[in-house]
Amino acid sequence: MDSGDDMLDMYSGEDDFYSDDYKDSDNDDDDDDDDGEPDYGFVEEDADDSAMIASHRSQKNYCVLREEDIHRHQVDDIERVSVVLSITEVEASILLRHYHWSVGKVHDEWFADEERVRNTVGILENPVVPPSDDDTELTCGICFDSYPPENIVSVSCGHPFCTTCWTGYISTTINDGPGCLMLRCPDPSCLAAVGHDMVDKLASGEDKEKYNRYFLRSYIEDNRKMKWCPAPGCDYAIDFVAGSGNFDVSCLCSFSFCWNCTEESHRPVDCSTVSKWILKNSAESENMNWILANSKPCPRCKRPIEKNQGCMHMTCTPPCKYEFCWLCLGAWMDHGERTGGFYACNRYEVAKQEGQYDETERRREMAKNSLERYTHYYERWASNQTSRQKAMTDLQQLQTHNLERLSDKQCTPESQLKFILEAWLQIIECRRVLKWTYAYGYYLPDHEHAKRVFFEYLQGEAESGLERLHQCVEKDLLQFLNAEGPSKDFNDFRTKLAGLTSVTKNYFENLMKALENGLADVDSHAACSSKSTSSKSTGCSSKTRGKGKGSSRTG
């Protein structure tokens, strides 16, 4: 017979699921903690640790692009297409915009059927209206005035329009928004594309600036492997390499988000769970659940009423003024000492024991339980978010003021105090992970009892280790900040904090892997345990039968 305690025991021995990295750094000289808590022993930081951390963090599957980087990539793609297809850069930019800035797609479509691509995109090889050979005046297709040839402009189709009408047409389209990038010939029946050369030639300075902004942003917004950082006011973009399985992205503005759903980074929870959790936090359904759990409808006018005093005698607000019992919703005139008085209702209690109270009451009980469960997880989710924001503020305070002060007091270069910054960064990351484990726990199915027990055990250990690290960097550091001069204990503090940071990092990385794997180890260990129990039971029964036969022969 397996139980939750048996399962926890499997993971609490020498082969602890989350202790391999720590054990590698431990020596046999270290003693176990007497209080039975996880051993977050302190390890000496190797000389190459900093280089190893930097190397590990540099292995990213994305690249942050500034505006000048975006412009350079855009120009490079245009030039590449122009050279390969032997077309102008204006025509290359029109092609790339149409095919969402995919150079490979442009090449494939062009070499498959050039004529079809030209007609679809609007890059005409031959003009629809042949050019005039003489110097006779031409009629503008918009204002129908006659102009000399130098005042008439046309695109690849050859339809003639005066510069004034072109300027007004382009300006109106640009002010309508990014749709100006797909500008076509003003002739309603013509699909010839208008390139940025016409905008540079005829638009005003303000309109040119808007068009260039739209043109630059289209390189990110139409590109499937690039996205803008969703942080407010951030102008950086992310070039992402798909296929790594990890969607976490950190922008240069310090905002971290998920590439897949553009919400804040939420490992180990998947995007669909985050979407459901955020919707639940903001949905009206929670308000209705609260109303259902904490109010009851007046039996006469049906308006919801919240109980705000101790007794069960309720009086509806005017004009109804109906008096009734809060528990059984019966008329108050039928109540008195025989029904339990002001603070009880025997009729309700008897009906409840007999299972006679109606479906509305059952729904109210269910809503109350659901609301209490949601509140439990939401409060802890929000609490870790608050702690994370406070840690970010403390880190900023350390970088701007306290680091220099600590360096002066302990006579230590700031370059040798990076272990404190690493600790704060680890706390910020762990608070984020711990926050989302509560969303994970909320949606963990109730029938998977073994997983829930193991998950809560892992979550509790994570909280314990993180609190120990947070307390060390937040409170233990104060004695060195407030010291009059260098302290001989500072090196011990360095060793302790570096060790806690390393162990906490390893634990949380393994925790994320386990949750992302759906706690599959619980199922495998449960299967092994059941097989082991079955074999033991079979062995015991065989031995018992053997002894029985032996005793009968002896007798």
Image (tube, helix red, strand yellow):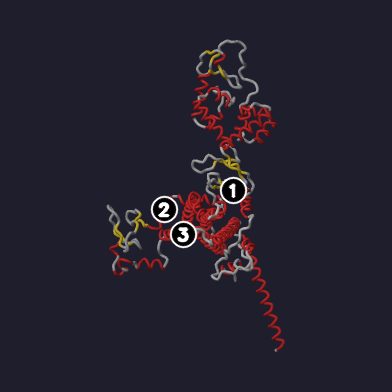
The residue located at (29%, 67%) in the rendering is 336
Q: Quadrant of residue 103?
A: top right
- Locate the N terminus and report the quarter of the image it occupies: bottom right
The mark that comes first in sequence, 3 or 1, is 1
Residue topped by disc 1: 247
In the rendered image, residue 395, in percent from the top left (x then y), is placed at 50, 52
| Mark 1 vs mark 2, CA separation in Å | 35 Å
In the rendered image, residue 403, in percent from the top left (x then y), is placed at 51, 52
Element type at mark 1: loop
Between 204 and 105, the one lying in front of the other is: 204
Between circles 3 and 1, the one closer to the viewer is 1
Res. 279 in view: no
Between 187 and 49, the one lying in front of the other is: 49
In the rendered image, residue 80, in percent from the top left (x then y), is placed at 66, 32
Is 213 left, or right, of 49 in this rendering?
left
Between 254 and 257, the one lying in front of the other is: 254
Amino acid at dot 2: Met
The residue located at (35%, 54%) in the rendering is 304
Element type at mark 2: helix
The mark that comes first in sequence, 1 or 2, is 1
Residue topped by disc 2: 288
Amino acid at dot 1: Phe
Amino acid at dot 3: His
